[in-house]
Amino acid sequence: MKNYVSIVFALLLSACAVPDTTVKTGSPRPTLVIKGAPADSTLLVDGLVMGPATQFNGDPNVLILEEGLHQIVIKQAGVTIHTEKTVISNGESRTVTINAGVK
């Protein structure tokens, strides 16, 4: 009887093993790359300052965004030199090219 209880206990204990779990993330978040920005320009996304526009030139840094509609603004010495609205989806990389002197 003692052996029988030990075997049943061992079987019940083995049923309590750690479950096999897998974590999956959804699609990768969208990214933004700024090309051709002047050295002293600033990037604003949806009215928020992200930092120097040259920082997000894709080599190696990109700006990770949420998907949806975004207002992209590049300013140099407080003057807007580029502005656009863009819709960006998960897994997408959007490149904004700045043409010097063109608004």
Image: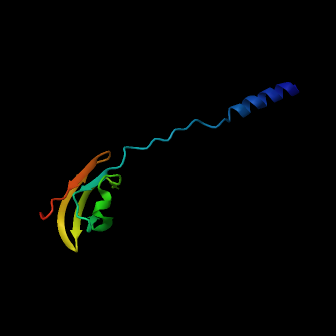
Image quadrant occupied by the N terminus: top right
Give the left or right position of residue 97, taking residue 45 as reference.
left
Residue toward you, 89 or 45: 45
- Residue 26: x and y, percent? 40, 44
Q: Position of residue 25 (x, y in %)?
A: 43, 44
Residue at the extreme left: 102
Query: What kind of colouring is applied to the model shown?
Result: rainbow
Q: Residue at x 68, y 36 (%)?
A: 16
Residue 27: % across, % down: 37, 43
Q: Residue furthest front?
A: 39
Q: Nearer the viewer, residue 76 or 9?
A: 76
Q: Point out the image quarter for the C terminus.
A: bottom left
Q: Residue at 21% of width from left, 58% of height from top? A: 36
Residue 18 vs residue 44, the one in the foreground: 44
Q: Give the image location of residue 94, x and y in percent.
A: 25, 50
Asked which quadrant contains residue 77, the reply is: bottom left
Rendered residue at 46%/41% (across/down): 24
Foreground residue, 9 or 70? 70
Report whether 95 appears left or right of 4: left
